[in-house]
Amino acid sequence: MRWLNRPGALATLLLWLAAALLSSSFAVRLSEMSAADHPTVVPSGTQSAQVARLLNPTGVPEPLPLAVIWTQESGNRITPSQQQAAQRVSGQLTSSGPASTPVLAQDGGALMALGSADPARLGESLAEHREAADSVPGTTVHLAGPAAAQADLENAFARTDGVLLAVALGGVVLILLLVYRSVLMVLLVIASALLSLTTACAALYVGARAGWLAVDGQTQGIVFVLVIGASTDYALLLIARYREEAGRRKCGEAAMRAACRATAPPVLASAATVACAMLTLALATLPTDRGLGPAVAVAMTCCAVTSLTFLPAALMLCGPRALRRGAATGRGEGLWERPARMVQRRPRRIWLICLGLLATGAALSPLLSQAGVPLHRALPSGAASVVGQDVLARHFPAGIASPLVVVAPAAERSEVSRRVAATPGIAAVSADSEPGSSEPLLVTLVDPPDSNEARHTVDRLRAALAGSGALVGGQAAQLTDIHAAAVRDHRLIMPLVLAVVLLLLVVLLRCLLLPILLVAAAWVSLLAAFGTAALILSLFSGSSATEPTVVLFSFVFLVALGVDYNIFLVHRVRQEALSVGTVAGVREGLLRTGGVITAAGLVLAATFAALGVMPLLYLAQIGLIVGVGVLVDSLLVRVFLVPALMTDLGAHVWWPSRLPGDQAPETVATVPGPAAGGGTELSTTDTART
């Protein structure tokens, strides 16, 4: 820490200024890259992936299926003249291949033609198709199918990067103003967070361009909120310790060096915990899940480096005027003395009450169903593809826009076709080729291809075709394989995350019992967050269904972040307990870190809540679950449960090691209380301070 003097701080600030100038444009470049990149999401060994390779050996992106639906503006039946007009323009509705003949619905209220759109210029292609379809007089045109849904997804993500950043920063600024009541301090913390973000974006862009990382809109949104939240949390921790050290030392440079030496271990341990936990996703089956882990690890590294270099330098150059006392950054004698006394007087009662509250929330966790949410229900309700899918389902089989593709040996084609037609959930089977043909069968589903019912139909169909050599592909089959892979990832990643976090805590705390307790507390807190979020979703959206990937991401974040705050607390408790013993150390640690860690929890919850502005329901659900979990952890687990457990266990909590401060038993002295005959019990350490 010898560089922490005014010349060193100035040099550090200039280096970061140069880095900011060099990386300032990378956030925009990363957004453009993530919008243009459509990584493969289907596991390579699945049936749907095999069918895709058989039909497209070159791997060149194929046109996306599209359904164009015409309905009468007056709500009447489609007229013959309108059918003829649709027939004339049908050739303009496909980017490649033969034109589709428009089909009249059985109720006569709609006309539908199958087309395709070029994925390389999806927006322009759909605009051209819509313009051609609009030439049919007296009709309203709707677009549905994979091409329309993908276009809505891209358009929504393209408009939300700036909104997401503004909402996240707005929440952080509001909380920081309440904490510090100092515009200068808020500007320093926000500058540190933005610098972490631009550095992370630059690193991710370089990694993605080199092919080392896969970054899509979902990954970028999560990284944005995590970097803002984590950087702010680290800044809160450093500033609180700097203020504390500045009260003990007259020299500002010495105070900053002491603050950095004390803050660096928990900050680095926190970043390492989140990074290592997220890196377990690299073992996931789904490519999109594998890409998130390394991206978050890179982002957390940038957060830690910025918080321990740029912010100390900026604080030193600003001098004492930056340390205006805030509401939640000092010792917190008024606010945190009472919880500390409660924990010390009745520790067992406190942790039993906390476990009861958490168990109540955890009992609701089965309500969070992992059955899946169809994409057309996860997009905004007013999206064109959602409206188009609803119109399509009213007049035609809902799966007509994206049929299943069954590839079968030529000798088995007739038998395979018979089995397919006999499977429940199948609306129609193509019969445009001879029995001995090697052409694939096109199978229309009764239900939308992204629905749970379609997934069950695919499972039934594959079971019916077992032993025939036939393979089932297409959009519904791909989504079925993705869902199955996500369930398999759960069974692998979840226990691995717990093991990694436990190992890191054992190394950091140099004991065994306390890490086990911290991981167990994070697990119970996680289940309580799932249950509470499921209840909120049920009350406000009418459904608590979500995707397995949402549960997996939320699990990894909550275990890592939940242990994070306990690292901040327990590291300080250990520092104090080395000299005064565990019980007194818990009290002092809670007093010293109560305000800053609670403020950090509020900041992180607010930043994850900003995911609610994202266009996908899945991301909003992640924001809700993680936000609720962070609040539960920072306001209940860290303030009451963990301190009460440590106080109740005393010196045994560090088993199998023992701290020097616990070698001699603590004696208890009684000092006169404010009322006659009253008294307050204090340890010998507190008596000495008094």
Image (spheres, helix red, strand yellow):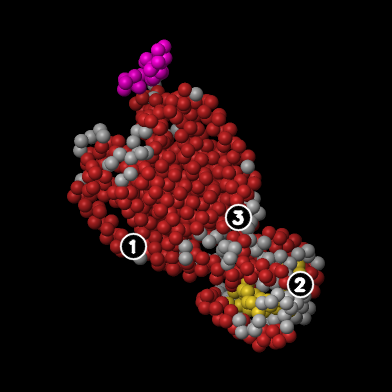
Say if 310 sits above or below 148 in the image.
above
Instruction: Residue type at mark 3: give it.
Output: Glu
Side (left or right) of 270 relative to 523: left
Residues packed near mark 2 inside 10 Å, few (<14), some (14 to 19) or many (20 plus) = some
Seen at 29% across and 62% down, the residue is 21
Residue 85, relative to residue 601: is it above or below?
below
Q: Disc 1 and disc 3: Cα gap in Å?
A: 35 Å
Q: Which residue is mark 3?
A: 547
Residue picked out by circle 1: 23
In the rendered image, the residue lying farthest to the front is: 74
Q: Disc 2 marks which amino acid?
A: Ala
Write down the quadrant of residue 388 in the picture. Answer: bottom right
Checking the image for residue 428, the label placed there is 2
What distance separates the C-alpha of mark 2 from that of mark 1? 55 Å
Q: Earlier in the sequence, mark 2 or mark 3?
A: 2
Q: Position of residue 689 (x, y in %)?
A: 31, 22
- Tell me if residue 519 is in the magenta stretch: no
Q: Which residues are magenta?
A: 667-690
Looking at the picture, tell me which residue is in the foreground, 512 or 674: 674
Disc with the residue nearer the chain's start (2 vs 1): 1
